[in-house]
Image: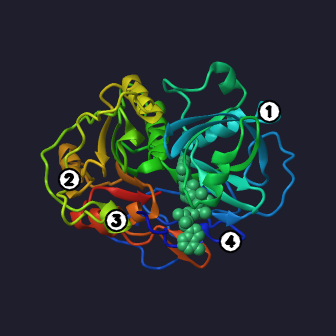
């Protein structure tokens, strides 16, 4: 059973959203809460206010998505991906020709999110738009209308995710943004993306942003390690690099305290074939991205249910397979995305100081590996 997630400022009632400046190095972890930049991994903040946050009442008059005021969208569809997560499609309530430009600028920059408002409680949470080029993507009409899609997990005790899952098709949803979570530097050649659960949404964005903006001659690579609790979350997914088992302890067992963790051997092997009849929509998205950019994107799946987990070996195997660089470190990037416990286990927790969310020092599995050529960023 999942105990309550430790309450963090991310979920508290705050008035303003911190500007995100901090970055994480494998060699020089930032200890001070002062905002800093590192290796050009600049975080551009287009939004100005409110994170997991109290939301001041504002008129939803703008037809175009913007960081200042909430814009009304309506729920076009909500398709279940698993028992606990769904794919949401939202269309701007009022037509606006400018939405395309707003989205495009964010896509060109890197990984971005928007904040959804829960109007009764006047709180907001961040969610990650999915790229629109893949197989299960928006129709041309929906794209022209400025629709956005989201992969959202329903937290059984969560205020906003429960609210979103309770909405009927046609209901209004208010959002503001874009908020750039991580600008992907132009020099980036290789991304290792370590994702837990819905943390896969930014991985899809990273794949889209990185691969879409580069030419045939300049072919970057992205390798995704995706951990899930249940088979249905990533049904039909087949790992590209099956590995030998290596018994260890899963981050889930540490974070969620699964009772059988000490008796059941855990394996670091990626899941070769997941025994599900239908392929999950997110797996279809990943497959579509893979066929669009053959050889440039690979995915390995890990399942708590199957006692497979992302450990040091999974990470170092990929790291070792990449060509050595002149330690400019701008070309190799590790992104970690998922629940707080997952990020903490992999790279150490993010910090909250002086009203700001900071990257915090690099810790956890990635620090132990001492990866000098790699920049690390916690999403
Ligand atoms: C940049 C970014 C992008 C994101 N993108 C996505 C995405 O694409 N899809 C997605 O599904 N999620 C995404 N998230 C996570 C999302 O923003 C929410 O955090 C998530 O949906 C939970 O919000 P909630 O309001 O439903 O839950 P909350 O109400 O915030 O509760 C979360 C958990 O905290 C516990 N809790 C609440 N209050 C307390 C308390 N006082 N003490 C102890 N425990 C407490 C609850 O029991 C619950 O388990 C993203 C987060 C960020 C920061």
Residue 342 marker: none
Quadrant hosting residue 237: top left
What distance separates the C-alpha of mark 3 from that of mark 4? 26 Å
Report the side of 181 relative to 291 (left or right).
Answer: right
Residue assigned mark 2: 316
Q: Quadrant of ligand 1?
A: bottom right
Q: Earlier in the sequence, mark 1 or mark 3?
A: 1
Disc on res. 13: 4
The residue pinned by badge 1 equals: 96
Label 2, label 1: how many angstroms apart (C-alpha)?
47 Å
Residue depth check, mark 1 versus mark 4: number of the one nearer the observer = 4
Does residue 313 show up? yes
Res. 8 visible in picture: no
Secondary structure, mark 1, is loop
- Image color mode: rainbow
Disc 3 within 8 angstroms of ligand 1 (CB): no
- Horizontal relation, residue 70 to residue 302: left or right: right
Mark 3, other Cα within 10 Å: few <14 / some 14–19 / many ≥20: some
Q: Position of residue 152 (x, y in %)?
A: 55, 46
Q: Residue at x 39, y 45 (%)?
A: 188
Q: Say which label, 2 or 4, has the lower sequence index.
A: 4
Discs 1/3, front = 3
Q: Circle 4 — which element?
A: loop
Q: Are marks 3 and 4 in contact (CB under 8 Å)?
A: no
Could you tell me which secondary element the residue under label 2 belongs to? helix
According to the picture, the residue beneath numbered tag 3 turns out to be 345
Residue 331 image offset from top left, x and y in percent: 35, 47
Q: Decide if residue 275 is on the left or right side of residue 124.
A: left
């Amino acid at each position: 059973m999942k105990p309550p997630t430790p309450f963090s400022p991310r979920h508290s009632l705050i008035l303003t959203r911190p500007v995100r400046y901090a970055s994480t190095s494998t060699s020089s972890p930032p200890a001070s809460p002062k905002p800093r930049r590192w290796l050009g991994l600049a975080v551009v903040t287009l939004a100005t206010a409110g994170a997991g946050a109290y939301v001041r009442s504002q008129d939803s008059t703008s037809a175009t998505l913007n960081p200042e005021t909430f814009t009304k969208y309506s729920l076009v569809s909500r398709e279940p991906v698993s028992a606990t997560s769904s794919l949401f499609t939202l269309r701007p309530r009022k037509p606006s020709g400018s939405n395309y430009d707003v989205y495009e600028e964010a896509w060109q920059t890197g990984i971005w999110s928007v904040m959804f408002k829960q109007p009764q409680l006047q709180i907001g949470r961040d969610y990650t738009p999915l790229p629109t080029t893949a197989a299960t993507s928006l129709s041309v009409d929906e794209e022209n209308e400025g629709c956005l899609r989201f992969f959202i997990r329903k937290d059984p005790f969560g205020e906003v995710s429960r609210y979103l899952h309770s909405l009927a098709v046609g209901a209004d949803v208010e959002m503001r943004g874009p908020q750039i979570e991580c600008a992907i530097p132009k020099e980036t050649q290789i991304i290792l993306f370590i994702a837990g659960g819905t943390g896969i949404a930014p991985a899809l964005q990273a794949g889209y942003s990185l691969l879409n903006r580069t030419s045939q001659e300049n072919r970057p690579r992205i390798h995704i390690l995706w951990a899930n609790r249940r088979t249905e979350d990533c049904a039909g997914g087949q790992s590209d690099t099956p590995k030998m088992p290596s018994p260890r302890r899963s981050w889930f067992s540490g974070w969620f305290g699964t009772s059988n963790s000490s008796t059941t051997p855990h394996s670091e092997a990626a899941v070769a074939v997941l025994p599900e009849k239908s392929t999950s929509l997110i797996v279809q998205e990943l497959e579509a991205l893979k066929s669009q950019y053959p050889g440039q994107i690979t995915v390995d799946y890990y399942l708590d249910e199957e006692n497979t987990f992302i450990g040091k070996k999974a990470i170092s195997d990929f790291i070792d397979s990449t060509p050595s660089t002149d330690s400019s470190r701008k070309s190799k990037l590790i992104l970690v995305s998922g629940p707080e416990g997952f990020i903490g286990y992999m790279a150490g927790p993010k910090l909250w100081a002086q009203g700001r969310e900071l990257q915090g020092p690099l810790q956890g599995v990635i620090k132990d590996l001492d990866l000098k050529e790699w920049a690390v960023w916690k999403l």
